[in-house]
Image (tube, grey):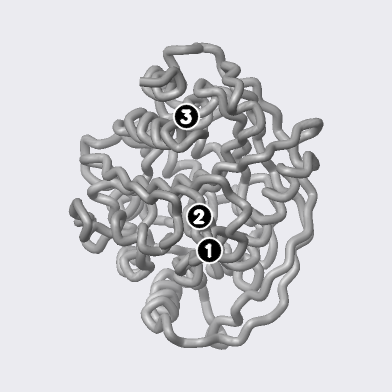
Amino acid sequence: MTLISMLAFLGPLLCAANPNCTVLTIPLTAEASNEVFPIPTGFNFSAAATDALVQTVIGNADTVYPVVPTTFTGVISARYCKPTVKIANRTHIIQFFMSGVTENKLYWSGLGYPQGIDGDEYSTIAYASSQGYHVLAIDRIGVGNSAHPDPILQLQVPLEEAVSHELVLMLKAGTAVPDRKFNKVIFVGHSYGSVLGNAQATNHPGDIAAFILTGFGVSAIPVAAGLPQVVPISAELYAPRFAGFPPGYLAFSSESGRRSYLWGKPGSFNESVFETDFNNEDDVGLGELLSIAGGLKLAPNSTAPVYIITGDSDDVFCLAAACGDGPNSPQAQACALFPKASTCQYFIPVGTGHMISLHYSAQESFQKYHAFLAANGF
């Protein structure tokens, strides 16, 4: 075993220090062509109306909708963390974290900062830092402290991927993190964030050196099928923290539905972690739910290695939370989206739902993907 491979197994034992992190506010402009979805006149953003619309759009994947040029100009809130150990070949590599819907950058630090629940047990940032990587975790546009554009016309896969592309260019140019340039960017996504990673591999295949896609699958059909469980309603009506948000910003209002849809089998997670997640959930734009299938496309020119982590009881990308194993699993089938990847591998943590970084199996998932990176020269 090489020294680098050994580091991936030893993980946080190497250094108990917390990562040295800084909150950044990054202004940027991005452009894309977004779809004009058929929002009915008088649409009331109720759970029933939202579910029906999402089912219709995703269920009719071959329907072509008009597109319009769309621009985002605003700020991205990000947390940049330095590595807690120095490893020579990782000096100019950064892991770029992209969360899923109703989550923000706190997902990557165990739902808290400077420490999450149970210290660093659920902190992807702390683990990556202990392996010698720089880290940038962002609030996607529309969540956290980043700008909140139109939740239907702007919050869609094409424009959010364009924002991600601009951030990668800035990381390489040294204009995102002060006085620091990176020559390799590793994309680490979760759920909708992983879909954006797929879109980036499709649209800008030279951006990313390696992809780690968690809570990911090959089809959006299960996403739509399970959505009614969470009872998506107008965020403004759901909680005071969303006061003033325009219609189209939604929240998952059902505690039992969130538990079933996102968390999976009882006993696979700490109840206090679930409660913290439910009580502090962020929003989701209706445009994100409607456009998600558009991000699950063939990436014919991306050669970057890909590692997929999806739990065996993920109810978001596996129908009836039955993911299976082996070549017929959604995880394995998702590798077909990356036909020119230097390698595409997957890991299916047992007894794990959709929230990969927040289950009891989190440390195993962290170790697995870092071992994959080490084995591929990162």
- N-term mark: 2 or 3: 3
Q: Is residue 68 above or below residue 264?
A: below
| Residue 3 pos. (x, y %) | 44, 18
| Residue 265 pos. (x, y %) | 22, 44
Q: For this view, does 37 lie left or right of residue 244?
A: left
- Res. 363 image quadrant: top left
Alpha carbon separation for disc pair 1 and 2:
6 Å
Assess whether mark 2 and mark 1 are in contact (beta carbons under 8 angstroms). Answer: yes
Residue 161's disc is none
Residue of label 1:
301
Q: Say which amino acid is labelled 1.
A: Asn
Q: Residue at x 56, y 84 (%)?
A: 42
Q: Which residue is drawn at 61% across and 68% down?
A: 158
Q: Residue at x 51, y 44 (%)?
A: 188
Q: For this view, does 88 lie left or right of residue 276?
A: right
Alpha carbon separation for disc pair 2 and 3:
29 Å
| Residue 5 pos. (x, y %) | 41, 24
Q: Say which amino acid is labelled 2.
A: Thr
Callout 3 environment at 10 Å: few (<14), some (14 to 19), or many (20+)?
Answer: many
Assess whether mark 3 and mark 2 are in contact (beta carbons under 8 angstroms). Answer: no
Q: Say which amino acid is labelled 3.
A: Ser
Residue of label 3:
123
Residue of label 2:
303
Most foreground residue, 200 or 277: 200
Q: Is mark 1 on a helix, strand or loop?
A: loop
Assess whether mark 3 and mark 1 are in contact (beta carbons under 8 angstroms). Answer: no
Callout 1 environment at 10 Å: few (<14), some (14 to 19), or many (20+)?
Answer: some
Alpha carbon separation for disc pair 1 and 3:
32 Å
Q: What element carries label 3?
A: loop
Visible residue check, residue 235? no
